[in-house]
Each structure stands twice: as C-alpha cells, then as structure tokens.
C-alpha cells in the first residue's frame, strides 16, 4: 500500500525542514535571468530551479499560470518539471486554484490528481468559491491517489481580506471534518497567508497542513510566520517564490536562508519579534 500524502509530507518536513519553494517563471524573472520569454527559456529556468532546490525544499510549487501562458508548449514544460521533481523525490504542489461544480471538478481531479495523468501532482490548490462541498469529488480523488489538496481559506493578497473573512470559518470547519481521525495529517490542507494580521484559533483543530504564502516579495518574514503559526508550527509550510528566484546564482543559498530562518523562528531558537 502506498503512503498517504500526509505521511509523505510529514516525512519530507522532518527531513528537509519547513519550506515550499515556488516555481514562477514570469516574464520579469526570465528577463532577470537573461533567458528568452519562450518555452525554451521556461524549460531552462525550471531545470535550474529543480537542480538547485529539489533536495532542500520539502515541497516545490509550480505556478500553473506561468506555464499556461504558453499553451500546449508551456504545459509540456510543466509536465517535464513535475516529472523531474517527482524523480528527485520532492513533493509537488501544483498551484492551479481550481474550483467548479462537481462534474467539472471531477475532470480537474482527473487532470491533476489521477496518478496516471501526465500532470499528476502530490497536491493541488483548490478554490472553495463554489462551496466547500463542491470540492468533495476532488478530495475523494486525492485520497484515492495518495495525494492532497490545499483549499484557499485566507490568501496572502490584501484585496482578499473582506470577502474571505466571511467564509474562512466554513472552509476551516469543512477541512477539519474531512481530516478528523487521520494521522499525521489529513488530506485537506488550507492556504493562510503569512501576510495576515492574525489567524483563526480554529486552525489548531485542522489536523492538516497549512500553506503560508507571502514570504519575501509580499512582505512577510520568518518572524511573521512564527508569530502567526506558532500554535500550529508542526503543520505550517511557509512558501516563497520571487525572493528565492530573483538571482539564479543564489537560488540554493536563498532557499537555505528562508528554510533555516523559518525553522529557527518556529522552534523558538530565535525569539519571537513584536
Ligand atoms: O494566498 C496565496 C496563494 C497563492 N499564492 C501564490 O504563491 C506565489 C507567491 O509568490 P511570491 O513571489 O513569493 O510572492 C504566487 O505563485 C502566487 O500566485 C499567493 O501569493 N498567495
């Protein structure tokens, strides 16, 4: 029997420490790397990131939008990047933020979670905007494929605050209900920005992983991660993209910096800053 996503994520966090590195091959970053904004440039970018971080980041998170922009040729690069990451033993979280009615969700699940699919990842991001229950088929598919999902609860962008504060409680309750009884984590993670001023107390009963984007370019620091997520330190997965990707020569050192700083702040080795 294969190991569940929760078991594999726990092992990876214990082995590598708490960091998710994003692969966001934007036109600006390709330009900063002196690469063509083309599928070939995209491929070179991704190969370089995989080689530099696959063994030190617990999870790597390709941002689908930057691949989709190139149509089928970009998706082909995404497929190869997912394959390279999985071969390297890294967990792949595909950031696609999908959410739709049940029959359409089933097709998304087939694309991103069915282990026979060329785009199959270890986990995907999902949007609960059509109702948490509309994600049920995708969650069932994730469990059947030993994969996971991360449902948007409170995202890192400031524009989301008013809308998401109204519904985050429902998302956290829905996720906790699915995760109940699973060990070490259930299959349903949530997304909670590291940029938030505060988080919901109910996160302590989630029994699932917490993806915390916003580190670096969006202004959050490792100290913020510890201040917000200290009560769920065993489950938090801080995520960083541009602040690590800015300079190809410093990919690994920046990754190690964010990983080690997050680990030190979360463990209390570095005292929490006000
Ligand atoms: O709440 C969210 C959810 C997802 N993202 C994505 O993460 C990266 C962030 O990139 P940075 O360069 O570290 O700012 C990007 O792919 C977003 O789409 C997020 O920022 N916030």
Image: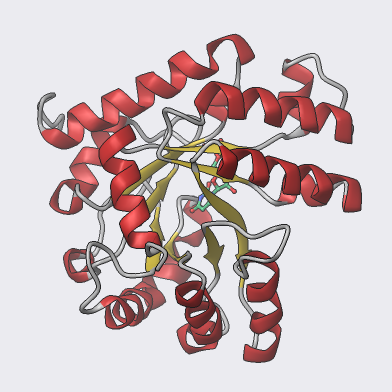
Split into quadrants, the picture shows ligand 1 in the one at top right
Q: Is residue 33 above or below residue 11?
A: above
Locate the N terminus by quadrant. Answer: bottom left
Q: To which quarter of the image does residue 130 belong?
A: bottom right
Q: Position of residue 62 (x, y in %)?
A: 62, 44
Q: Is residue 88 above or below residue 255?
A: below
Residue 17 at least partly seen: no
Please name the residue shown 35% across and 46% down the image. 237
Q: Position of residue 257 (x, y in %)?
A: 36, 19
Please name the residue shown 28% across and 24% down the image. 261
- Between 122 and 98, the one lying in front of the other is 122
Q: Position of residue 238 (x, y in %)?
A: 37, 42
- Between 166 and 107, the one lying in front of the other is 107
Q: Is residue 120 above or below residue 66?
A: below
Q: Is residue 171 above or below residue 146?
A: below
Q: To which quarter of the image does residue 208 belong?
A: bottom left
Instruction: Report whether 72 appears left or right of 251.
Output: right
Q: To which quarter of the image does residue 271 belong?
A: top left
Disc count in the image? Answer: 0
- Between 19 and 118, the one lying in front of the other is 118
Instruction: Report whether 179 appears left or right of 164.
Output: left
Locate the C terminus by quadrant. Answer: top left
- Between 125 and 179, the one lying in front of the other is 179
């Amino acid at each position: 029997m294969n190991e569940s996503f929760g078991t594999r994520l726990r092992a990876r966090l214990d082995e590598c420490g708490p960091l998710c590195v994003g692969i966001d091959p934007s036109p600006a970053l390709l330009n900063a790397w002196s690469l063509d904004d083309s599928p070939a440039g995209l491929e070179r970018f991704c190969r370089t990131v995989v080689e530099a971080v696959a063994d030190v980041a617990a999870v790597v998170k390709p941002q689908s939008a930057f691949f989709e922009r190139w149509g089928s040729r970009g998706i082909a690069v995404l497929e190869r990047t997912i394959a390279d990451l999985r071969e390297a033993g890294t967990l792949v979280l595909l950031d696609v933020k999908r959410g739709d009615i049940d029959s359409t969700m089933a097709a998304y699940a087939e694309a991103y979670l069915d282990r026979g699919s060329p785009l199959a990842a270890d986990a995907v991001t999902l949007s609960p905007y059509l109702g948490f229950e509309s994600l049920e088929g995708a969650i069932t598919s994730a469990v059947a494929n030993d994969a996971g999902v991360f449902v948007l609860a409170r995202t890192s962008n400031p524009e989301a605050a008013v809308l998401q504060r109204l519904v985050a409680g429902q998302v956290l309750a829905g996720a906790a209900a699915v995760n109940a009884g699973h060990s070490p984590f259930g299959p349903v993670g949530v997304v909670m920005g590291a940029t938030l001023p505060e988080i919901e107390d109910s996160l302590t009963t989630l029994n699932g992983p917490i993806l915390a984007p916003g580190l670096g370019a969006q202004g959050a620091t490792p100290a913020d991660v510890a201040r917000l997520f200290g009560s769920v330190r065993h489950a938090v997965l801080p995520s960083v993209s541009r602040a690590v990707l800015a300079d190809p020569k410093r990919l690994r050192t920046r990754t190690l910096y964010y990983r080690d700083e997050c680990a030190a702040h979360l463990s209390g080795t570095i005292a929490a800053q006000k």
